Image (cartoon, grey):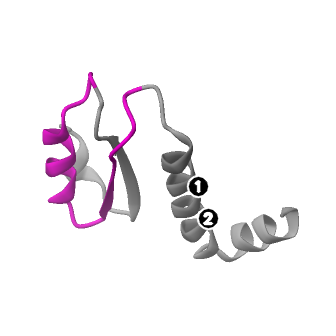
Amino acid sequence: RKHASHIHIPCHAFFGGLDEQVSLRSARYFQEQPFVTVHILEGAGHAYFPPEDQAEVLESLRRMLQGVSWAGERYHSSV
């Protein structure tokens, strides 16, 4: 949390709604940062992400990579 205000590039932060180690207060702090998109994965804990949450993470990463031309081309050619 102490470094979140130093983020000056677009990024995604994923938090487990059932996380037993990182509280959702951290997610609220990250939501205040202008370059951070926060995702709360309701069924995820700290170390376990159920399949539907894994799919959300992968889809978010895919969308992010499509914004980077070389990465988007590489992703599509490998699928």
Please check the rendered image and state whether residue 28 is part of the magenta-colored stretch, yes or no. Answer: yes
Question: Can you tell which quarter of the image residue 19 is in?
Answer: top left
Left or right placement of residue 37 versus residue 25 in this view = right
Q: Give whichever of 49, 11 is nearer the camera.
A: 49
Q: Secondary structure at mark 1?
A: helix
Count of numbered circles in the view? 2
Left or right placement of residue 18 versus residue 48 in this view = left
Q: Give whichever of 43, 35 is nearer the camera.
A: 43
Mark 2 = which residue? Answer: 62
**Quadrant of the frame with the N terminus:** top left
Span colored in magenta: 20-46
Q: Is residue 44 placed above or below 59 in the rendered structure?
A: above
Estimate the x, y position of residue 64 in percent, counting from the top left.
54, 67
Marks 2 and 1 sit apart, C-alpha to C-alpha, by: 6 Å
Tell me the residue at 59%/55% (across/down). Answer: 58
Amino acid type at circle 1 is: Leu
Estimate the x, y position of residue 41 in percent, counting from the top left.
37, 47
Tell me the residue at 29%/33% (across/down). Answer: 18
**C-beta proximity under 8 Å, tags 2 and 1:** yes
| Numbered circle sitting on residue 58 | 1
Q: For mark 1, does the 10 Å Cα neighbourhood hold few (<14), some (14 to 19), or many (20 or more) residues? A: few
**Quadrant of the frame with the C terminus:** bottom right
Amino acid type at circle 2 is: Arg
| Numbered circle sitting on residue 38 | none
